[in-house]
Amino acid sequence: MKVFLDGTPFLIEKTGIGHYAENLLLALRREDPALELGIYTISMRRAHHLAARAPSVRDMAIKGLNLPANLLYYAWWPRFSRPSAEDLLGSFDILHAVNYQAPPLRRARLVTTIHDVNFLRFPDLQSRGMRRFNLTLRSLVERSALVLTDSEFTAQELLELGLAGEDRLRVVYPGLHPAFTRPRDEGGAEEARLRYGLRPPYLAYVGNLHPRKNLAALIEAYALIVRDGLPHRLAIIGGGGLGQLHDREYRRLLERVEEVGLRDKISFTGYVEDADLPALLSGADAMIFPSLYEGFGLPPLEAMACGVPVVASRRASIPEVTGDAAVYIEEPSDPREIAVKVEGLLGDPALREDLARRGRERARLFTWEEAARRVLECYREVVGG
């Protein structure tokens, strides 16, 4: 069986979809050494970078196609069925769309992963690139033999929106990044924290700066925490993957930080490499994740793997990930509730220890080995065994 996955997420700083594609490819190779794997991308300006930026997977075919992606995906292919993916890539059995887009197919079967549909739920908060997904999502799902989702929540979203029926939906939970399962080097961790200007005690948020992440409310809540006398800094860890939207949100958040007089108390680290993230997370006394909408939510899982207690909103898919190993924010738009929950956690050593234990146990449930086994079952299902 020969499978091609969309490698477009490797052309930018790796965010959630990039991590998904990379770790799935590596796990598929481990689970089935005989599986023929390939990745492709269509990009007029960046396709030639794919080979240099792709993960190192044994015997993987790499096809970087210097073609006008936006013209093809959003103008030409919705009207015409040529050139097909087989015309561009040769013969194969399955195309796995992991980035909300796929060329037309002649004989191969389409498997699509829908990570979330936040661009449908929050249409006014999107970059232009994300808004384009609205144009082709329904067609993509209709063409798919199976639709994979990262959570039961996203599967229900697709059902409610009338995009897919239960017969074609399969929930496959992502796994924990291998960087969080390696033995910890405390000396190296301290060095990494210093490189990003982080010294304990601090609180951490991890993720991009999209408005649905609710960072404005987090900053307001942190101002209340500081006013109540707690000594912790706030580290906003991560960024990238949003283009101009990231720049706009960063300026907006920084302006608010200046207004509340916390410029010397809040650190924006910018994009963090995979190898450094466990060090930055493990140094925090708590991880705060007030997001309004997640298709899965990797950062709470990563914090739990580090033994860091989590305060998270009880929204969307987040409870599927954190289970009984988090303190929940019932109304994440309320900064006072966020502050109260964080202060309560920091003032209760027994609760912190209990959450750290339960978090580590729960994080072990999410593995890429299991995800790869489930995905392989889906591949075999659509090609008839």
Image (cartoon, grey):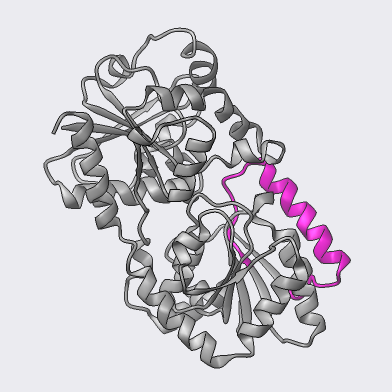
Whether 241 is among the magenta residues is yes
Quadrant containing the N terminus is: top left
* Quadrant including the C terminus: top left
- Residue 13 at x, y percent in the picture: 51, 48
- The answer to whether residue 125 is above or below residue 100 is below
Q: Residue furthest right?
A: 259
Q: State whether residue 112 appears in this view.
A: yes
Magenta-drawn segment: 236-265
Q: Is residue 44 above or below residue 290?
A: above
Q: In the visual, does 333 lie left or right of 164?
A: right
Give the tally of numbered discs: 0
**Does 171 sit left or right of 340 as displayed?**
left
Residue shown at 79% from the left, 70% from the top: 263
Placement of 56 over or under 360, stated as above or below: above
Residue depicted at 51% across the width and 23% down the height: 136
Q: Is 243 situated left or right of 249 in this image?
A: left
Q: Is residue 201 visible?
A: no
| Closer to us: 165 or 101 | 165
Quadrant housing residue 228: bottom right
Where does residue 338 sit, x and y in percent of width and height?
A: 70, 71
> How far across and how far down the image is residue 328, in percent?
59, 70
Q: Residue at horizontal 69%, vertical 63%? A: 331
Closer to the camera, 378 or 68? 378
